Image (spheres, grey):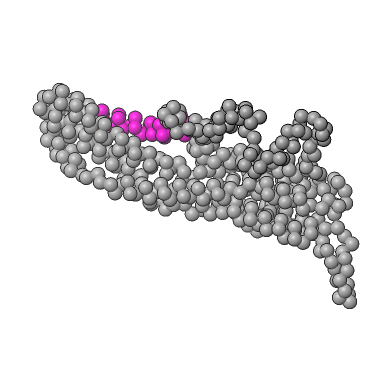
Amino acid sequence: MSVSYSLQANTANLSSILRVFYLWKGSLWKLLWRELLIWLIVFFFLMMIHAFVIKNSDFEDIYRTILGGLSSVELDGTIMFLLSFLNYNSLTRWSDTYDLLMWPENIALYFNQYFNEKSMSSKEEAKNLRNAIVRYITTFYILIFRDVSTEVRQWFPTLEHLVESKILTEDELQLLTSSHLAENSCHYWIPIDWVALILKKRYRPKYLYDSSGNRIRNPKESIMNQVHFMEFMRELAKLRGKVSDVLSYDWVPLPLAFIQTITIVVYSTLVISTIQMQIKIIDIKSKDSHDSLITEMFVSFLSTIPTNVLYLSFLRISQVVINPFGQDDDDFETPYLIDRHFKVLQEILCKPTDAPPTPPPVPPTSPAANAQMEIMNRGPNQLGHTLASAMLSGISTNSMRNAN
């Protein structure tokens, strides 16, 4: 689930920065604490190995030679260029994938506005049609997200679970799986095709032509007129096109070798920086200067840890956002989206309102009527303020009271 911190960062002041800084879920600290702990363990382990095993032994010269060779390795800014390139591509893919998660409200609202209930033989048939559209669009989302999200795959491990959840009937499931496609192929487009077919079956052109070529009015009611039918179909095709493109990002990820190369470079850099710190500490210990040793360790930590944290954070952030449908803290909560879309579709399609709410009548001499007339008589830039909004806008509360 994506971590929201907008409320904690509502103002750019020190307290807001500290509130965001100490968040744990989805934070930098939660991502890096294991790697930093291992780095510290390796650092002190190498110190102990030299102090109690290698020092004053036959292997000390060999050990110093190895450390000396590694200490000459230059850690330049090439790694930052590679990490920046990886993060740019990962975040771009993450943003583009989010833009593809089209919500189904437009489909439901278009259908509510364009649907001609007189074309149905009964209210029960109209109700069943609305329920079918809700179920088929929900099935479309489930089939898409099953192929990219581990959480949705765990929620619906097989297509039979769609029947257990009463999203589909047994006959509909059999129809879904009876295609010539392989079992593991994508079937996401089939429910959208069902929606189009059940509407097309009930669509009637406004005019017909008799055997003489004369245009006559069609006596049968159509589920929608021609303009509305075409507009609804375009919106349905738009939904299918945008959401199904999520699969394209899943099928064609960033090159694996590129990810492996940067990962190896980052962790190799951490190891080399640890060894380079060791050779400095060993040289100072050989001078029997305890104060210099403490100072050098402190300075080395201050100079090395921020750089290591920067490298690790860039790498781990790219690893998190490279697949936004996983189980990380900042991944998209696809089960919530499916549940939310299902409930919204039910609310719009299965509980339609015949007309917008009508405001209650107000007696012409009541205070409410006077307030309405005052608002209507104000100019376009004279919208009323509360005391709180006046303070935020810099308006004097005294002048506001005098105006009232």
- Does residue 22 appear anywhere in the picture? no
- As for residue 24 lying within the magenta part, the answer is yes
Q: Residue furthest bottom?
A: 212
Which residue is pictured at 19% across the width and 25% down the height?
Answer: 294
Q: Percent from the top left, x then y, of residue 215? A: 86, 71
Q: Percent from the top left, x then y, of residue 355? A: 80, 44
Image quadrant containing the N terminus? top right
Callout count = 0
Image quadrant containing the C terminus? top right
Q: Residue furthest top?
A: 290
Main secondary structure of the magenta stretch: helix
Q: Is residue 153 left or right of residue 130?
A: left
Q: Nearer the viewer, residue 305 or 149?
A: 305
Q: Percent from the top left, x then y, of residue 127? A: 81, 45
Q: Percent from the top left, x then y, of residue 117? A: 83, 50
Which residue is pictured at 13% across the width and 32% down the height?
Answer: 283
* Position of 227 relative to 6 (above/below): below
Q: Nearer the viewer, residue 120 or 4?
A: 4
Which residue is pictured at 21% across the width and 34% down the height?
Answer: 277
What is the span of residues highlighted in magenta in the rendered image? Answer: 22-45
- As for residue 3 lying within the magenta part, the answer is no
Q: Nearer the viewer, residue 40 or 313?
A: 313
Q: Residue furthest front?
A: 402
* Position of 56 relative to 253 (above/below): above
Which residue is pictured at 15% across the width and 23% down the height?
Answer: 291
- Does residue 218 appear anywhere in the picture? yes
Q: Is residue 375 left or right of residue 88?
A: right
